[in-house]
Structure formats: C-alpha cells, structure tokens
Image (tube, grey):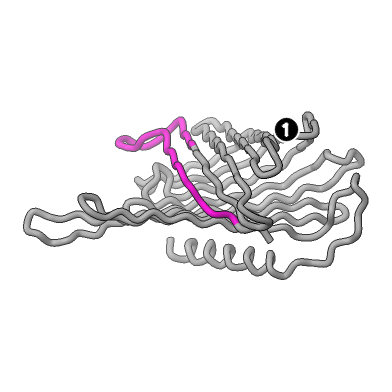
Amino acid sequence: MKKTLCSLSALGSLLVLSGLLTVQAEESTSNETKLGWSTSAELGAITTSGNTKGTSITGKIDSKQELEQWSNDYTFSAFFKRDETEADDGQTIVETSAEKYAASAKGGYKLNKDTARLFVFGSHVDDRFGAYTEYTTVAIGYGDELFKTDTMSLEGEIGPGYYRGKTDLEETENGMILRSAATYRWQISESARFKQTVSLEYGEDNKRSIAESSLTAKINGRMQMKAAFLVQNDSKVPVGKKKTDTQTSLTFVYSF
C-alpha cells in the first residue's frame, strides 16, 4: 500500500513538472488545435473547530498534451480528511476518516476526422476507507465528438477493457469490462463554465459508475473558483459498506 501511495505521489509530482516544462507550441489558425501542454491545478481545504474539529483537503491536477498525431490526458487527485474527537476521559482522539488517491492517463490517436480518436486508457485508485481499497482499470476503444455548437459540446467513447479490484476484506476481483464515458461542456458566459462527466465500467462481478458535475467561475486570467459534486457507485460491495460515495468540493483552480 505504501509503495502504491509513493508511486501515485511521484506521478503527481511528475505531472506538475510536466506542466511547468511547457513545450513549444506551433502557430495555428482558428480551425487548428494548439499544440503543446495545458495544465490546471486545484486545491481546497476545510477546517472546523468548536464542537466539531477536523480538517479535509482535496486536490487535483489535470494535464493535457496535444501533439500532431496524439491527444493525451493525465490526471492525479487526492482527498484527505482527519477528525478530532474528545473521549469521555477528556483526551483528544485524532482519527483519519478519509484517504484517497487516484491517477489516470489516456492516449488518443487522431484519425483522419478531426475529432475521432482511438484511445488507450488506464487508471488506478487507492482508497483506504472505500469498499474497494484498490481498483485498477485498463481499456481501449473509440471516441468522437457527438455534437458541438458555439457554447456547447458533447464527447463520447466506448471500448472493452479489464479491471482488478481489492475489497476492504482483502478479496481480489478481476475480469473483462465494457467501458463507456461521456463529457458535456457548456460555456455559460465568458467567465462561467459548466462541465458534466460520466463513466460506466460494466463487468460481470461489479458495475462502477462515476459522475461529476462542476461549475467554474473565472476570477482572473489564470485563477478560477470551482464547485463540484461527485458520485461514485459500485453495484457489489462487502457487507457493511455503502454502494454510493459522494463528495462535494469548493476549490481554487490555477491554469498554466
């Protein structure tokens, strides 16, 4: 577990470094995609005191790389929560109640059509208090832009894959899956943007769905405020665990 967390932390550091070392982009026309790196880093923290004491921290790094023939996406996220309670004897008890790390990468090979892609996807999640303490997914498939207007767009992808999960009871599951995903974007105004992502991994043993709704408001040229609501559902979980996890976050986002 420690080795995995160290690997994920190292991956997050590499993503930050990759974003800082921006490659030289070619001059493009209004109809061409700008080549190079674009990265955003977000961070949010909540501290409570008084009758309830605790600290929760959430962070995420999104990095996108555009090449002549490839469009690549990399993501690293972390969530940590620690609570303080007072025992009957007056002693303060500090407990970690949430600790989750996730990393994913997707490489999209551009076809003759501007928006069509053949993709390779991989993700890994370590969730110390989740129904699945480890969950790894790999998939390949086809993705395309389903529709686009001046302010809205919808992208979808689908393909076969494989997953391996370890429950909190140390039981291991694995098998073939069918993975599908969609991303909807709506530019509400010059300073406000809505985004909805949905993914479904359909396997014989477990069906995992993840949906995130987010609203981003621009503060200045590089800084934004983001409010997000995430829902994750597993169809099969160990006894005593809930099938659905939710997370509401308010973060600052810096783009570079």
x%, y% of residue 36?
80, 60
Residue at left offset 67%, top offset 47%: 121
Assign the magenta stretch its main secondary structure: strand
Which contiguous range is marked in magenta? 231-253
The N terminus, quarter of image: bottom left
Q: Up-down: is 2 above or below 146? A: below
In this view, the residue farthest toward the left is: 89
Instruction: Give me the residue at 40% from left, 45% from top.
Output: 130
Residue 221, given in percent of the width and then of the height, sits at: 68, 56
Instruction: Report whether 17 appears left or right of 35.
Output: left
Residue 127 located left or right of residue 38: left
Q: Which residue is mark 1?
A: 154
Q: Residue at x 91, y 54 (%)?
A: 28
User: Is residue 219 something that shows in the picture?
Assistant: yes
The quarter holding residue 171 reads: top left
Q: Quadrant of residue 61?
A: bottom right
Tell whether position 119 is magenta.
Answer: no
Can you tell which quarter of the image residue 42 is in?
bottom right
- Looking at the image, is 99 positioned above or below residue 18? above
Total residue callouts:
1
How busy is the neighbourhood of tag 1: few (under 14 within 10 Å), some, or many (20 plus)? some
Q: Position of residue 45 (x, y in %)?
A: 43, 56
Which residue is nearer to you in this view: 188 or 106? Answer: 188
- The amino acid on which the numbered mark 1 sits, given as a three-letter code, is Leu
Q: Determine if the magenta segment contains residue 249.
A: yes
Residue 76 shows in this picture: no
